[in-house]
């Protein structure tokens, strides 16, 4: 979900650096702040330059503070917060987002306030505090409704539905997801529709309606492919594979093909966690079809990726699960 709020620039960093070097006078300070912000975003998109990207974004925030341009400060603070969220610095990100919300309230930027509350909710939910996340996302929904921002409302209701569901409020969660789906259909937001269909499909899996879930996932897959969303396509292929695997009489050959397709796309996208999930899924299929040697190979690859992810806390449960699978396969 966070990838939907990331505000990256597509301009070549060399050109942006050249333009920054041309800012010499006080009159060019607003341009300098904008360029610092853009450069920081571009660098943060390449994780190898994470520290450098954060430094440029911090300089952009400092420049906007000196200018006294609160609207520009809103944009740069929000981007710096997103960068910290991207790289796991949720504590710092929440502080920055809280400040952004306060400034947005003072200058009457309702849309920015709502967007920041949504980001706060996502960060809190990721840290496991679903109650706080639901409070923040409920405030965001109210602001989006008041502003008649249906796209923002659809996104916030999707987040609320996921959080309600994860907290055990199944009926409330599904209702929010269905509201999000209805809004996205009205907006003809095909990727948003696919996202909602996938989540509702997962709810159907949980209550044992596998055939209906497959229908939802297949419709979502068609939309992702139509729109060229390879990240969504890879994710949906995995969901389809897991549903086939979960069925006692599921098609194991098709299941393996789906995981391998997702694996190829995930590798092309540079999605390390997507690759790890696929490797584990392939291992599950092979363990289920009495090929423990091949299963062990894929489990080990998935385990190594999880351990090398740099997010030890977030990956701990997955690492323990993989170790137990390895022990059974041996």
Image (cartoon, rainbow, N blue to C red):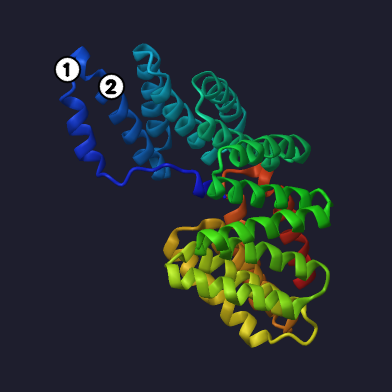
Question: Is disc 2 placed on a helix, strand or loop?
Answer: helix
Q: Give how far across and how far down residue 239 sits, in percent.
A: 64, 70
Cα distance, mark 1 to mark 2? Answer: 11 Å
> Which label's residue is closer to the chain start, 1 or 2?
1
Q: In which image quadrant can residue 174 be found?
A: bottom right
Q: Is residue 300 visible?
A: no
Q: Is residue 155 visible?
A: yes
Q: Is residue 186 left or right of residue 68?
A: right
Q: Give how far across and how far down residue 274 sits, in percent.
A: 56, 61
Q: Is residue 204 above or below residue 142?
A: below
Crowd around label 1: few <14 · some 14–19 · many ≥20 (10 Å): few
Disc 2 target residue: 30
Q: In which image quadrant can residue 292 be found?
A: bottom right
- Residue at 21% x, 13% y is 26
Q: Nearer the viewer, mark 1 or mark 2?
A: 2
Number of residue marks: 2
Q: Nearer the viewer, residue 184 or 326?
A: 184
Disc 1 target residue: 24
Q: Give how far across and how far down residue 70 sits, in percent.
A: 42, 19
Q: Which mark is residue 15?
A: none
Q: Nearer the viewer, residue 237 or 70?
A: 70
- Residue at 58% x, 78% y is 258
Question: Is disc 1 placed on a helix, strand or loop?
Answer: loop
């Amino acid at each position: 979900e966070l990838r939907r709020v990331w505000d990256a620039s597509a301009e070549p960093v060399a050109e942006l650096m050249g333009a920054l070097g041309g800012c010499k006078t006080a009159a060019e300070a607003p341009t300098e702040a904008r360029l610092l912000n853009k450069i920081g975003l571009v660098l943060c998109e390449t994780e190898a330059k994470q520290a450098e990207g954060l430094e440029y974004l911090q300089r952009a925030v400092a420049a906007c503070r000196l200018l006294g341009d609160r609207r520009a400060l809103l944009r740069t603070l929000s981007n710096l917060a997103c960068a910290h969220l991207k790289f796991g610095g949720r504590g710092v990100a929440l502080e920055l987002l809280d400040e952004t919300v306060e400034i947005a309230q003072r200058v009457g930027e309702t849309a920015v306030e709502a967007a920041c509350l949504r980001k706060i909710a996502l960060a809190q939910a990721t840290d496991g505090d679903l109650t706080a996340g639901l409070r923040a996302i409920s405030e965001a929904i109210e602001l989006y409704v008041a502003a008649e921002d249906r796209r923002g409302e659809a996104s916030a209701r999707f987040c609320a539905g996921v959080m309600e569901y994860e907290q055990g409020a199944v009926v409330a969660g599904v209702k929010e997801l269905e509201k999000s789906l209805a809004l996205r259909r009205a907006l003809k937001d095909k990727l948003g529709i696919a996202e909602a269909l996938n989540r509702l499909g997962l709810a159907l899996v949980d209550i044992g309606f596998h055939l209906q879930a497959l229908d939802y996932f297949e419709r979502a897959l068609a939309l992702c492919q139509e729109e060229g969303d390879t990240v969504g396509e890879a994710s949906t292929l995995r969901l389809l594979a897991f549903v086939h695997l979960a069925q006692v009489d599921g098609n194991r050959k098709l299941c393996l093909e789906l995981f391998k397709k997702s694996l190829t796309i995930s590798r092309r996208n540079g999605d390390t966690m997507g690759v790890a999930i696929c490797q584990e899924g392939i291992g599950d299929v092979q363990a289920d079809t009495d090929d423990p040697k091949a299963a062990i190979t894929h489990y080990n690859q998935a385990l190594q990726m999880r351990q090398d992810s740099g997010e030890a806390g977030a990956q701990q449960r997955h690492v323990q699960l993989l170790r137990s699978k390895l022990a059974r396969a041996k």
